[in-house]
Amino acid sequence: MTTIAQNLRLAGTTKTVTDLKWDLRQAQIRKKLSALALIAPLAIFLLITFIVPIAVLLQRAVENAEIVTVLPKTVAALASWDKRGLPPDAAYVALANDLTLAHQSNTAGNLARRMNAEIPGARSVVMRTMRAMPLLDANGMPLSPTAMKPALIALDESWGQLEYWQLIAKNSSAYSPYYLLASLDLRRDAFGDIHAVDADQAVFVKIFTRTFVISLVVTLCSLVLAYPLAYRLSLMADRRANLFMILVLIPFWTSILVRVAAWIVLLQSEGLVNKSLIALGLTKAPLELLFNRFGVYVSMTHILLPFMILPLYSVMKAIPPTYMRAAISLGSHPFAAFWRVYVPQTLPGVAAGGLLVFILALGYYITPALLGGPNEQMVSYYVAYFTNVTINWGMACALGSLLFAATLVLYSVYRRYTKTDVSM
C-alpha cells in the first residue's frame, strides 16, 4: 500500500487508492453496460419470439378455466360436497343462476365444449339448459330452492346423473393437469386418482411412439448414408472436398415443400422410380411408394441428411490419417484398424449428428402429412389439428409441451456431445 501511494505521489497525482479503485469499478461497469447494450436487441428478439411463446404454451397446457369461470357459484356450492351422491339443493340453485348469467353474456359455448370433451353429449345438455333459463313458476316468479332440483332434472335428466356434477367439482380450479394427462392417455377421476383411459380411447401414446420410431429410423438411415460420404469427403483434398460439400448443401437452398413435391412426382405409380424398376425387370407392377411409411422415410432422410454429414465431416477432418497408417504398419488388418482406431474417434460426431437429426425429425409436420397415410402422422400433425380444426388450444399446447420437454432432454445430451467434440 505504501509503495502504491509513493508511486502515485511520484507520478504527480493526487488520487488516493480508494479513488483509483472507484474509477476501476466504474470502468468495469461501463464495459458491462456496453456489452449488454450490444446483446440487448438479440435478447429482446429472443424474448418476444421464443421465450414468451413457450411460456404461453406451457401455461395454456395447464389452464382449465372454462368451468370455474362460467360456473363460479356452482363450484363454490360444490366445495364441501362428498361427490358420492347428488349434490344439495343449493348446487342446483347456483347452477341455474350461473347458466342464467351465461345466457345473458353468451359465454356458455366454452363451458359446453369443455364438458363435452370428457362426457360426450354434454354440450347439448348445457346449451339446452341454458336456453331454458331462467326457470319460473306458474306466477312468473323464480322457483324456490327446493323446487329447482326437480325442475332441472325434469328439464334434462342428465342433471340427475352423478358424473355431470363430479365433472364440475373436479374442475373447480383454473389450472389442472387434464390436458397433460389426456396427452398421455390418462385421466383423473372425481376423487383425484389417476387412471389409464379405456383401450379404445388410448391414442396419444401410440402417436408419440410412432413419432419416436419414425425419427429413430430416419436418424439411422441418415447415419448409414452419411458416414461413408463424410469419410470420403474427409480424405479428399480441400478444394475438391469443398466442391462436393456445396453439392451436399444444395438442399438447404431449396424449399422443403418443393423437395416433398419432387418426391411425390418421383415415387408415384407413374413416376420415374416405378418406371425404372419395371424397365429393369425388377417388378411387374408399380409399387406403392407413396402415402405409406416408406415415402416418409425416404423424404425425411433426404431432407435431414446434411445435418448428419456436417458434424461427421467436421470430426473426421480433424482425425490425423497417420493413426490408421500406424495401426496397419503394426500388423493390424485395415478393417480392424478402421473399426478399432478410426471409428471410436468419430463417435462424438456420430452422437452429435444423430441427436441433431433426431431432434429435427421429432417436429416434422409437412412431410408426413403429404407423403404419409393416416398411420404415419406424427405429434406435430395433431398439434396443428387441435389448433386449426377443433380449436382446442389446451390439448394442442399439452402435446406441444410434451414434445418440447422431450426435445429439451435430447438437446441437453446434444450439447454435451458437442462440447466433447469441441474439446477434442
Image (spheres, helix red, strand yellow):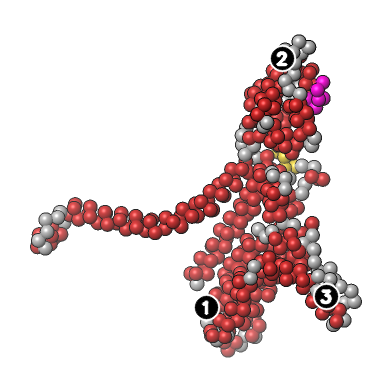
Closer to us: 37 or 188: 37
In the image, residue 38 sits, relative to residue 128, either above or below, namely below
Residue 252 shown left or right of residue 32 in the figure: right
- Between the C-alphas of marks 3 and 2, the distance is 75 Å
Q: Which residues are magenta?
A: 154-159
Q: Amino acid at mark 1?
A: Ala
Q: Earlier in the sequence, mark 3 or mark 2?
A: 2
- Between the C-alphas of marks 3 and 1, the distance is 42 Å
- Between the C-alphas of marks 1 and 2, the distance is 85 Å
**Is 157 one of the magenta-colored residues?**
yes
Closer to us: 203 or 369: 369
**x and y percentages locating residue 359 in the rendered image:** 63, 61
Per the image, the residue denoted by label 3 is 274
**Is 366 one of the magenta-colored residues?**
no
**x and y percentages locating residue 267 in the rendered image:** 79, 71
**Where on the picture, by quarter, is residue 350?**
bottom right
**Is disc 3 placed on a helix, strand or loop?**
helix
Per the image, the residue denoted by label 1 is 318
Q: Earlier in the sequence, mark 3 or mark 1?
A: 3
**x and y percentages locating residue 85 in the rendered image:** 76, 22
Task: Assess disc 2: are there few (<14), some (14-19) or many (≥20) residues with their C-alpha within 10 Å of its C-alpha.
Answer: few
**Is disc 2 placed on a helix, strand or loop?**
loop
Q: Amino acid at mark 2?
A: Pro
**Is disc 1 placed on a helix, strand or loop?**
loop
Per the image, the residue denoted by label 2 is 142
User: Residue drawn 60% across and 87% down?
Assistant: 328
